[in-house]
Image (tube, helix red, strand yellow):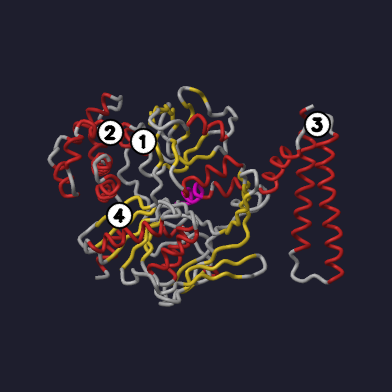
Amino acid sequence: MRGAAKHLVRTLVLILILSVGWFAGLYFGRQLTDNQLRIYLNNYNAQNDKLSRVLMMIENEYIDSISRDSLTELAIPAILKKLDPHSVYLPPKEFEQADEPLQGEFDGIGVVFNMATDTVIVLNVIPSGPSRKAGVLGGDRIIKVNDTLIAGQKWSQTAVMKRLRGPRGTQVKLSIERKGIDGLVDIVVTRDAIPLHSVEASMMMTDKIGFIKLSQFSRTSYAEIKKALLSLRAQGMKSLILDLRGNSGGFLDQAILIANEFLPAGALIVYTEDRNGKQMRQYSDGRGGSTDLKMAVLIDEASASSSEILAGALQDNDRGTIVGRRSFGKGLVQQQTPFEDGSALRLTVARYYTPTGRSIQKPYTAGDGESYEHDLIDRFKRNEFFSADSIHFADSLRYTTPKGKVVYGGGGIMPDVFVPLDTLNVTRYYSEVSGRNILYRYTIEYADNHRKELSEAKSMRELKRLLDNDTALLNDFVRYAERQGVKPNWREIGRSRQIIEAQLRAFISRNSNLEDNAFYYFIRPIDSTMLRAIEELQAER
């Protein structure tokens, strides 16, 4: 019985695919004669009627009860899978969950995940959320929830969400599989309201250089950026580091508004082009209040979509130095169509281009989502994270900015200043204490034991003085790690000392009243991209 039903579903999917392909090829021709148009309309109506009849026959006459809606829910994703990697259908629950991080506050554990391989893979940990505080990392695989196995059980995303969500204040135990670590890592997360501020940190890095970390492009991003800029100017900011690393995008209008803040009047910010060559262009209006600031923009391989539009607009208008590694390469425009049942279709209808004419979208093969998803792994294997010389561009992808700077297309934004991924002092000892969450757990206990002193620190200087006075911090941590089963290797500890100490200070400081500002301040000694950006801005004086 099930085999017959599956056969009918496959047949229906094939009919839908053929119908859509025929429709697109005929309807979107450059020019149609009146006769061709009449033929098209007659044939389209026939095809449409045939499809409707098939659905109706299955619904009303098939031997088993199968609703038309259930067939449609199966067919639409199968069709879209044959298109580009970013055209997707979102059922009601998934649409609601996908929109939540950009809209408002919600209760949960604070992670963005997918289940592409029947395993919950953490894609992103929401800044300042409960999972970030507990030590969950991007790339973690959630194998168990409260000791219930969920990996490989073919659970729906909705079923997994029900396990992870719950009333704020309640706890959930996650058993995590982490790359490079044997066995599962247990992490207890206390559910809470998920903060959705897109400006994760805003502070002065030096007496003249301000720093803003933008984690996503939500509905309030531009307003948050404006507020942060005003505060930093009041503290003496003359130059700005805008950190877009790990920012996967969000609302396009917010990226345009932020770009407008830094660009003079009449500058092209971005344009889109559809299949018929029709373009829509966005220009700056000259009302931006930060056109005088010297700028450095930080990007990496996880910077995508709106992040690339903003970085590309500033780079192509010679308005700042882009520092870091080549961005993700997501430059397809999706038109979102909501349906009455709460679901939505996100269909790619155009491509994004930077002001010089570069396509942001990296190459892809329609219907081959697997290769597309492995692109970053392929970059790693090609040594692109470690050497700019490993990244090759064809001469046809060469473009020039108004001031003569050479930039390249072909997908993503290539930085002006390449900073390789730094793994020089990563030792086995560091990998163990970090990968097993031992380093992070130590900082939580340390913060709990020094809560009064940490809460009394009102500035970075006071917080630094407090941590500088604890000369036994590293040795105390090593003893803690040994109690957790990681024996000290002093040669490796010496080699990784700067990394370990910086992370200890950064994670401890995040538990102070200065929160994420303190984290980015104290992680700076091992943040080679940040250090290079400071160096570039100071050299411009």
Disc 1 to disc 2: CB gap under 8 Å: yes
Q: Is residue 333 left or right of residue 183?
A: right
Q: Answer above or below: position of 420 versus 233.
A: above
Secondary structure under badge 2?
A: helix
- Identify the residue position indicated by label 3 in the image: 4
Q: Which of marks 4 and 2 is nearer the N terminus?
A: 4
- In this view, the residue farthest toward the top is 147
- Identify the residue position indicated by label 1 in the image: 135
Task: Please state the extent of the stretch shown in magenta in the rendering.
Answer: 376-384
Secondary structure under badge 4?
A: strand
- Identify the residue position indicated by label 2 in the image: 444
Between disc 3 and disc 4, the foreground one is 4
Q: Choose between 481 and 390: the one closer to the eye.
A: 481
Disc 4 to disc 1: CB gap under 8 Å: no
Under mark 1, the amino acid is Gly
- In this view, the residue farthest toward the front is 340
Residue 117 seen in render: yes
- Residue at (18% x, 49% y) in the render: 459
| Alpha carbon separation for disc pair 2 and 3 | 56 Å
Disc number placed over residue 202 in the picture, else none: 4
Q: Choose between 102 and 202: the one closer to the eye.
A: 102
| Alpha carbon separation for disc pair 4 and 1 | 22 Å
Secondary structure under badge 3?
A: helix
Q: Quadrant of residue 465?
A: top left
Q: Position of residue 259 (x, y in %)?
A: 42, 66
State the quadrant of the C terminus. Answer: bottom left
Q: Answer above or below: position of 425 versus 322.
A: above
Under mark 2, the amino acid is Ile
**Residue 382 is covered by the magenta coloring:** yes
- Residue at (86% x, 60% y) in the render: 42
Disc number placed over residue 533 in the picture, else none: none
Badge 3: few (under 14), some or many (20 or more) residues near its Cα, within 10 Å? few
